[in-house]
Image (cartoon, grey):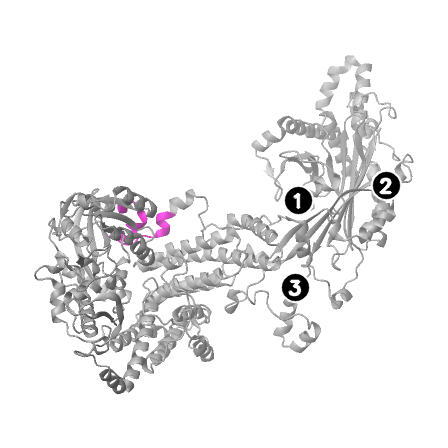
């Protein structure tokens, strides 16, 4: 070593205390740390500078000598110790703390409340404040919960100090000041000396570090006592700008490393076997469309087009289901790819140049990490705009819906309320027109919405997705700021359009032509279903009137021998009438009258009110039976009651025919069941009273004109609160359905979450149907919005990851589940936003076969881009430079006993890492850390 | 099982703790109406086939609770099926009845009626019960008890054989069903005569225990 050790501190003696000259050597004058102006070159020299561990050893040796020389002064010296200089007290204080930490060991320290170092799973830290003179220092001991493997330093769980210097546990001592850095060299060297002495005293091998210089330089000096023979010294420094070109390339960095021991020792041969390992971090380029969007808004379309003609101008989520309503910020800003090159041996700097040109595909492993937009974890209300935010507004509108009896009230008086103007603004009529055009667009045609898509969907009492009312609700969400007044205006126009359809017998758009009313949907949708059916009937009634005459003639032509058969739907196979040898005809029958939920309710109430009085409740059912009988009679003019029963209620016909005999005989043998044949049987009575009338001549069971008018009346007089209740249900359901349509690679976790969302919605929205307290409900609904937001964000994230890594589905799923697990703790149900501190850092290993898919994320830069950027570092991936290049150089040397005449026997075959250099660099930033092991 | 056919209470609050809606389904002629008549009026007669739907109310005291049972009896004829579908709504209990002497009434349960339940029932947790009627006609038996048990296991429902004629197991049948409904909180929530409860507040302790809630 080229530096001269300063005087070893001696234990204080009385003489030292009295004489000023004697005290001086005790405060160790720091060795001059030769940081040259060219810092990168100076690193080597600097590393050799601090040799404080030598103090420790010398001190012990000196101590021994003194003890041998003056054994009788033992007691006196002990006394002196108590009145030792502040520096010595400082050392002993450090020593005491270290002894305590050493004695405790990781397990007890953790039990005593060592804090875990943020973002490191395995790393924990204890710290103590120390006072020396006027300055307060903080000593931190970082230790690992469990030991690590040897080559795991590229692992993410490695602290920068561990990575830089190749150490495991370590101590850092720094002054408690704003910058936390020891500013002058003497102080830092003194501090390091103190800690080295203390550690040596307690026989610890912990490396210790002291920050030096300006904090931006991230410069450190450090020392580690390695047994009695070896000492390791550490030194790190940084060049933050104007990195010499030589040091931007592997070759130059390799030479820098070599220069460290060529300078320090002539023992090394010219060709040194250097171990090399490298980690390259790439970041995907910015997506172009972000850039274009700004151009777009400035209406400079032509320029944008001419600039980047190959790429279509679009948002990332243009083809996602939600894009019809809003555009989400891409939660995945990009990806960081880490390519790691494992340990390799090199002898010449020239070989390094080859590595620089090698393809990243040759790297040993690839790790991918998504760069996630901060909005994903920022859940302060109002930050995220999506369905969740609009639903929140809708819930607010729901809360205020109880304030008025009629929707018109919200629209009418607004002149007096200037203060809340901003809250209740209504978009201009042009916007309303656009919405109405979209809703009642003829081309929308008959919607093919699926009823009751899934179990939970059915439990949600809303309108089916894509149906007229569902579409209305979605429009309302994005209509202005979805305040109650805007909703009222929109609804009134909506009902006006429906009234028009009814009057003009125009088919309702976005309604399935069906003959059933789905009672699991919301009442408004049921009413619209009813109206659609009524309009259909009304239309066909109008048609019939025109063609009535012609029809009648046609029927009279096809007269049967005895009586006219009317309204037959066809022959019932192998059924003959009982009294006459004729085939039985099944009649056309009327559809059972359609009822919406409220009509059923009414009937139930009526039935309950009549109580057990038999028969009173069944008028409608009897009408249906009677209608069926009339139709049957018309289709089979010679039929008997028995024939009707055989067709309508086969269970009540006791056949006495031999079943083994395939051919049925005529007349059919059998009798009516006991209950049918009893005297006063209701069925027979109705049969006797029923006239023979085909369906076409019967009075309709459903009065479509009346029912249709009732529906429109219902819509026109709907109470605001009832409207909002149904809108809330439908809007939640439809929004969830839209999200659910997104293709996200069917990630299992996402699917489960979606299912959970439906379940949560079902249970929350269920209480809307009961008449609970509105403010209570609104609270629940707002919580539901929160849940919705979390899932919406996760889903958008899933969709983004999925489409970016469409060719690497396994990788996409793993990345999603990493993020999911990171995000999960956030998903509490509380309304307060959670401050989320830990960052998402998990990297996912890229399989060999997935590398192509990942590299395609790095689109080769356009001529334009490459022109802008000067490439200087090499190690390109598809023309992109790494954003960071980290390198570890090391030299191992076999230690032979013979070479060093050390009294303490060492393991002779031990490989010792004599020099290690960690370099982290970009084209304008270089950070170098050096560890040198030396023997004395 | 105490029962009082009519309510005489004049108090302001509802004179029952829960209102349960029960539904009887099954092929025509299996004895649904007879079963209902036996239970509500303790009588047995050959009834006219039900036209569409019939309805009975019975007040009972079970497990210390005053219960109002609204029992809907539906017609088994195919023609009425579309009409009766609306009665599945909100039913807490559905009784599937078959005639042990007519095999097709049993097979139709799985072919038709169980599907109807899946299609129309709005209560996810609604309790289903399989009842084999007419065990008095043991000699004509066409469906064994074992087959009934197998079916009940497959569809996850309660099972009982009874006879409306001889009164065997009729009360037990309704009582079992009601007890099961009383054991099912989600059904009770709907059926409570009191004000609807806040679901989040109800679930609060559960959610805490589950550390963060499900969603």
Question: Which of the 4 image quarters holds residue A25?
Answer: top right
Chain name for mark 3: A
Asked if the magenta segment contains residue A283, the reply would be: no
* Front disc: 2 or 1: 1
Q: Is mark 1 on a helix, strand or loop?
A: loop
Q: Which residue extends farthest left?
A: A679
Evaluate whether label 2 is on the same chain as label 1. Answer: yes
Q: Mark 1 points at which residue?
A: A156
Nearer-N-terminus badge (2/3) = 2
Q: Where is residue A240 in the image (x, y as percent from the top left)?
A: 77, 52
Q: Mark 3 points at which residue?
A: A287
Nearer-N-terminus badge (2/1) = 1
Residue B95, can we see it?
no
Evaluate whether label 2 is on the same chain as label 3. Answer: yes
- State the quadrant of the N terminus of chain A: top right
**What is the spatial separation of the Cα atoms under label 3 and label 1, in whole angstroms?**
27 Å
Q: Mark 2 points at which residue?
A: A260
Query: Residue at left 84%, top 51%?
Result: A353
Numbered-mark total: 3
Give the crowd class for mark 3: few <14, some 14-19, many >=20 residues within 10 Å.
Answer: few
Chain name for mark 1: A
Position of residue A758 relative to residue A78, above or below, is below
Give the crowd class for mark 1: few <14, some 14-19, many >=20 residues within 10 Å.
Answer: some
Q: Position of residue A170 (x, y in %)?
A: 70, 35
């Amino acid at each position: 070593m080229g530096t001269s050790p300063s005087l070893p501190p001696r234990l204080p003696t009385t003489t030292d205390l009295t004489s000023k000259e004697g005290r001086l050597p005790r405060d160790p004058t720091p060795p001059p740390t030769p940081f040259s102006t060219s810092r990168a070159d100076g690193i080597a020299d600097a590393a050799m500078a601090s040799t404080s561990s030598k103090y420790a050893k010398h001190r012990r040796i000196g101590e021994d000598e003194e003890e041998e020389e003056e054994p009788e002064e033992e007691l006196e010296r002990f006394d002196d110790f108590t009145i030792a200089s502040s520096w010595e007290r400082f050392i002993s204080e450090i020593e005491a703390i270290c002894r305590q930490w050493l004695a405790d060991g990781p397990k007890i320290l953790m039990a005593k409340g060592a804090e875990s170092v943020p973002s490191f799973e395995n790393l924990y830290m204890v710290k103590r404040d120390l006072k020396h003179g006027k300055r307060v220092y903080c000593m931190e001991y970082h230790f690992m919960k469990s030991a690590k493997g040897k080559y795991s330093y590229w692992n993410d769980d490695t602290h920068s100090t561990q990575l830089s210097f190749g150490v495991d546990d370590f101590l850092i001592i720094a002054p408690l000041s704003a910058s936390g850095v020891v500013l002058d060299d003497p102080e830092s060297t003194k501090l390091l000396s103190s800690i080295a002495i203390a550690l040596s005293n307690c026989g610890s091998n912990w490396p210790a570090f002291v920050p030096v210089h300006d904090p931006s330089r991230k410069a450190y000096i450090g020392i580690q006592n390695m047994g009695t023979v070896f000492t390791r010294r550490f030194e790190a420094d940084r060049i933050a700008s104007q990195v010499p070109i030589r040091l931007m390339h592997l070759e130059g960095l390799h030479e820098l490393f070599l220069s460290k021991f060529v300078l320090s020792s002539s023992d090394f041969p010219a060709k040194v076997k250097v171990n090399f390992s490298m980690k390259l971090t790439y970041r995907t380029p910015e997506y172009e469309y972000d850039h274009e969007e700004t151009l777009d808004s400035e209406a400079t379309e032509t320029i944008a087009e001419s600039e980047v003609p190959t790429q279509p101008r679009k948002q990332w989520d243009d083809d996602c289901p939600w894009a019809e309503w809003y555009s989400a910020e891409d939660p995945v800003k990009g990806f960081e790819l880490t390519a790691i090159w494992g340990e390799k041996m090199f002898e010449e700097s020239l070989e390094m140049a080859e590595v620089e040109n090698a393809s990243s595909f040759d790297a040993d492993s690839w790790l991918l990490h998504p760069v996630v937009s901060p909005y994903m974890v920022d859940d302060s209300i109002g930050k995220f705009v999506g369905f969740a935010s609009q639903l929140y507004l809708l819930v607010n509108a729901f809360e205020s819906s109880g304030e008025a009896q009629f929707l018109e009230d919200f629209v009418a008086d607004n002149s007096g309320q200037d203060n809340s103007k901003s809250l209740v603004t209504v978009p201009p009529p042009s916007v309303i027109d656009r919405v109405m055009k979209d809703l009642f667009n003829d081309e929308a045609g008959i919607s093919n919405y699926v009823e009751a898509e899934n179990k939970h969907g059915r439990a949600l009492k809303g309108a089916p997705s894509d149906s007229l009312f569902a579409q209305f609700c979605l429009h309302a969400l994005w209509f202005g700021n979805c305040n109650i007044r805007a909703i009222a205006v929109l609804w009134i126009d909506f009902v006006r359009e429906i009234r028009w359809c009814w009057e003009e017998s125009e088919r309702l758009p976005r309604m399935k032509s069906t003959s059933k009313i789905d009672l699991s949907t919301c009442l408004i949708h049921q009413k619209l279903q009813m109206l659609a059916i009524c309009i259909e009937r009304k239309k066909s009634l109008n048609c019939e009137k025109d063609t009535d005459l012609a029809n009648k003639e046609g029927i009279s032509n096809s007269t049967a021998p005895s009586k006219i058969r009317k309204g037959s739907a066809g022959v019932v196979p192998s059924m003959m009438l009982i009294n006459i040898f004729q085939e039985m005809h099944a009649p056309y029958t009327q559809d059972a009258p359609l009822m919406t939920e409220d009509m059923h309710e009414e009937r139930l109430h009526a039935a309950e009110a009549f109580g057990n009085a038999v028969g009173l409740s069944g008028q409608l059912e009897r009408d249906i039976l009677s209608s069926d009988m009339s139709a049957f009679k018309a289709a089979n003019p010679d039929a008997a009651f028995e024939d009707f029963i055989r067709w309508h209620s086969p269970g009540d016909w006791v056949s006495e025919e031999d079943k083994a005999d395939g051919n049925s005989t005529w007349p059919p043998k059998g009798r009516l069941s006991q209950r049918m044949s009893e005297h006063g049987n209701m069925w027979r009575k109705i049969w006797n009273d029923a006239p023979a009338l085909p369906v076409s001549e019967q009075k309709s069971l459903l009065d479509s004109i009346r029912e249709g008018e009732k529906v429109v009346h219902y819509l026109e007089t709907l109470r605001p609160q009832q409207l909002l209740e149904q809108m809330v249900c439908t809007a939640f359901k439809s929004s969830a359905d839209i999200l659910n349509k997104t293709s996200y690679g069917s990630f299992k976790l996402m699917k489960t979450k979606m299912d959970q969302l439906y379940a949560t919605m079902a249970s929350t929205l269920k209480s809307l149907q009961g008449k609970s307290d509105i403010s209570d409900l609104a609270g629940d609904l707002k919580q539901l919005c929160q849940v919705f937001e979390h899932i919406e964000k996760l889903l958008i994230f899933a969709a983004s990851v999925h489409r970016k890594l469409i060719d690497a589905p396994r990788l996409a799923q793993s990345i999603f589940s990493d993020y999911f697990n990171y995000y999960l703790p956030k998903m509490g149900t509380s309304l307060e936003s959670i401050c989320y501190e830990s960052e998402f850092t998990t990297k996912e290993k890229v399989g060999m076969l997935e590398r192509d898919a990942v590299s395609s994320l790095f689109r080769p830069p356009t001529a334009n881009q490459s022109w802008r950027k000067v490439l200087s570092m090499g190690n390109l991936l598809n023309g992109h430079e790494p954003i960071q290049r980290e390198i570890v150089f090391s030299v191992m040397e076999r230690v032979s006993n013979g070479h060093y005449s050390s009294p303490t026997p060492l393991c002779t075959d031990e490989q010792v890492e004599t020099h290690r250099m960690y370099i982290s660099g970009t084209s304008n930033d270089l950070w170098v850390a050096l560890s040198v092991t030396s023997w004395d | 099982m105490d029962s009082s056919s009519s309510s005489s209470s004049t108090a302001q609050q509802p004179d029952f703790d829960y209102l349960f809606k029960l539904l009887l389904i099954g092929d025509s002629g299996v004895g649904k109406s007879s079963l209902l008549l036996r239970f509500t009026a303790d009588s047995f007669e050959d009834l006219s086939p039900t036209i569409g739907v019939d309805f009975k109310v019975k007040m009972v005291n079970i497990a210390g609770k005053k219960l109002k049972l609204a029992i809907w009896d539906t017609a088994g004829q195919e023609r009425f099926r579309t009409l009766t579908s609306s009665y599945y709504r909100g039913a807490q209990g559905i009784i599937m009845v078959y005639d042990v002497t007519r095999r097709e009434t049993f097979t139709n349960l799985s072919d038709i009626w169980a599907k109807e339940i899946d299609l129309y029932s709005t209560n996810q947790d609604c309790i289903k019960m399989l009842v084999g009627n007419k065990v008095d006609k043991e000699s004509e038996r066409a469906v064994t008890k074992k087959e009934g048990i197998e079916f009940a296991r497959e569809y996850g429902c309660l099972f009982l054989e009874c006879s409306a004629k001889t009164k065997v197991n009729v009360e037990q049948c309704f009582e079992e069903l009601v007890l099961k409904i009383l054991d099912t909180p989600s059904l009770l929530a709907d059926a409570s005569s009191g004000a609807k409860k806040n679901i989040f507040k109800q679930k609060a302790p559960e959610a805490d225990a589950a550390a963060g809630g499900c969603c």
